[in-house]
Amino acid sequence: MAMAASSRRACGRLSLRRRCLMMVKQQKTRFYILGRCVFMLLCWHAHDYSD
């Protein structure tokens, strides 16, 4: 019985770690996309041609 409880605790820690890693990955992806959008807008502004 004690082994099952410790196994559940280890599994809970692992899932918490996995959830944290997924959140970090999502934030990293969001910052990457945001950075690309800002870069694209800056380049578009720099190369804007007026008629």
Image: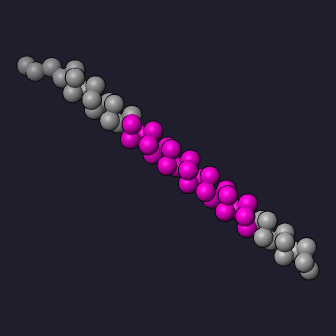
Residue at the (25%, 26%) spot, across then down: 44
Left or right position of 47 against 30: left
The foreground one among 42 and 13 is 13
Is residue 26 in the magenta section?
Answer: yes
- Residue 17: x %, y % from top left: 67, 58
Where in the figure is residue 40, as x and y percent of width and height? 32, 30
Classify residue 31 as left or right of residue 44.
Answer: right
Vertical arrangement, residue 42 with respect to residue 17, above or below: above
| Residue 24 vertical position relative to residue 32 in the rendered view, above or below | below
Image quadrant holding the N terminus, namely: bottom right
Would residue 3 appear left or right of 24 to someone viewing this image? right
Decide whether the magenta segment is chiefly helix, strand or loop: helix
Please name whichever residue, 49 or 36, is drawn nearer the observer in this view of the structure: 36
Q: Name the quadrant of the C terminus.
A: top left
Magenta residues, as a range?
A: 12-35
- Residue pictured at 28% horizontal, 25% vertical: 43
Q: Quadrant for residue 12, please give it.
A: bottom right
- Asked whether residue 32 is drawn in magenta, I would say yes
